[in-house]
Amino acid sequence: MNKQTFGKAHVPLSPAVRAGDFVYISGQVPAGANGSIVVGGIEEQTKQVMENVKAALALAGAELADVVKTTVWLEDARDFGAFNNVYGSYFESDPPARTTVESRLMVDIKIEVEAVAYKPL
């Protein structure tokens, strides 16, 4: 299998990895272009995370329409409704399979999202 990594991170991971026709996106957090966590609630943080997912996908030549599976970690399950409204705006038709869980996250954030896309070479 041919594996290719894309992008650089300040931690030991690749933002995007292509393995054959699949693109794997590392968990994206609500950090802006300057590396700082976005101020605000779940809506603002979800929007930033989804923009970061889009950017990571683009590194490997993929886009949100190619996403077949996401995994979402919410810091507080009570944020699910508000998260779901923002998330849904990024996948208005044919949304991917998704798993959403409540979890304590590694930094003081409300959400993290990873994605798998199918984009034939």
Image: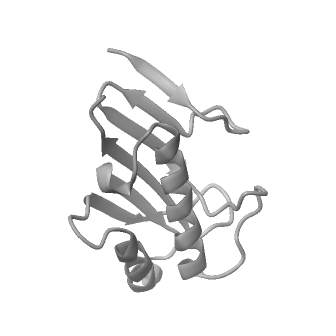
Residue 69 lies left or right of residue 64; in this view the side is left
State the residue at coordinates (49%, 45%): 58
Q: Is residue 81 above or below residue 55?
A: below
Q: Residue at x 51, y 49 (%)?
A: 27
Residue 26 visible at all: no
Residue 58 visible in the displayed image: yes
Q: Looking at the picture, tell me which residue is in the foreground, 52 or 62.
A: 62
Task: Identify the residue at horizontal 26%, vertical 58% (top origin).
Answer: 96
- The residue sitting at the top extreme is 1
- The image shows residue 105 at horizontal and vertical percentages of 58, 59
Q: Find residue 61 and report its image quarter.
A: top left
Quarter of the N terminus within the rendering: top left
Quarter of the C terminus within the rendering: top left
- Residue 49, image quadrant: bottom right
Residue 72, image x and y in percent? Answer: 41, 61
Image x and y of residue 82, in percent: 44, 85
Q: Identify the residue at horizontal 53%, vertical 46% (top origin).
A: 56
- Most extreme residue toward the left is 94
Which quarter of the picture shows residue 95?
bottom left
Q: Nearer the viewer, residue 102 or 18?
A: 18
